[in-house]
Amino acid sequence: MDVKAHWEKVYTNKAPDAVSWYRRHLETSLALIERAVPAREAAIIDVGGGESTLVDDLLLRGYKDLTVLDVSGTAIEVTKRRLGTAAGQVRWLIGDILEIGLETHAYDLWHDRAVFHFLTTPEQRVTYVRQVARTVRSGGHVIVSTFGPEGPVKCSGLDVVRYHAESLHGEFGGRFRLVESSEELHPTPSGTTQQFLYCYCRVD
Ligand SMILES: C[S@@+](CC[C@H](N)C(=O)[O-])C[C@H]1O[C@@H](n2cnc3c(N)ncnc32)[C@H](O)[C@@H]1O
């Protein structure tokens, strides 16, 4: 499967507020981020940020060191356009999280909503966790949200892995200390509901 081609097609064909994962604001992510890193200088990366408004809301709250990464250049362009001049305050990275070279110990907080669950092989998940372990500083924070145990088996036409807090945390291992987890019922634009799981870990 050509991951980039898939996502470019999705974002070329669908309006930002028409995709199933659309939310006007990622309230749960925002609350966790503000609690984890109250200092506005914290280096935050949103992995697979797509067209979400998380970056807009973090800028509004005064966060100064933001990176948004996505495999889709189309999604990044839409988000940059929406932000206008404020886009200049953000670092934008286009690439596959399993392949892109990120700076070592660059981030205080790693955020991922609905990307990790697309990694359906153990090798992909190990590669992802290695990226997190290498790029998040000691004492840093990792917030990962996937579909929960009652969530859909597919997202955007792709197979996903659904997680309990224990199984998601289990993918990350001992250096990642689970601080809290929660489930969220996400109302999709088409009127259905999807169960999401949030896990928040500290990196030792
Ligand atoms: C379901 S969407 C979620 C978007 C956003 N996080 C949100 O919550 O609105 C998944 C996003 O991850 C991106 N993505 C999928 N696989 C990726 C990968 N291997 N590397 C980087 N981004 C990826 C897609 O382009 C898409 O924007």
Image (cartoon, rainbow, N blue to C red):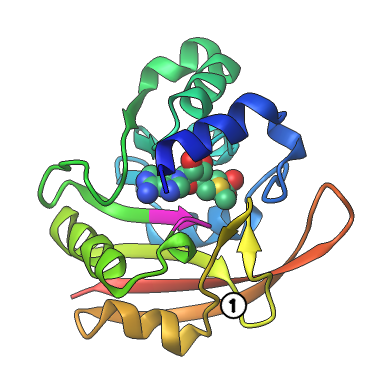
Q: Is residue 87 visible?
A: yes
The C terminus lies in quadrant: bottom left
Mark 1: give few (<14), some (14-19) or many (20+) Cα within 10 Å.
some
Query: Which residues fall within the magenta stretch?
Result: 111-115
Instruction: Residue 34 in the image: state x and y as whole percent.
Output: 48, 54
- The front one of 184 and 159 is 159
Main secondary structure along the magenta-highlighted residues: strand
**In the image, what residue occupies the spot 56% across and 21% down?**
78
Going by the image, does 154 lie left or right of 194? left
**In the image, what residue occupies the spot 10% across and 49% down?**
104
Which secondary structure lies at badge 1? strand
Q: Which residue is mark 1?
A: 182
The correct choice, above or below, for 76 with respect to 172 in the image is: above
Going by the image, does 131 lie left or right of 85? left
- The front one of 180 and 8 is 8
Q: Residue furthest left?
A: 104
The correct choice, above or below, for 82 with respect to 114 in the image is: above
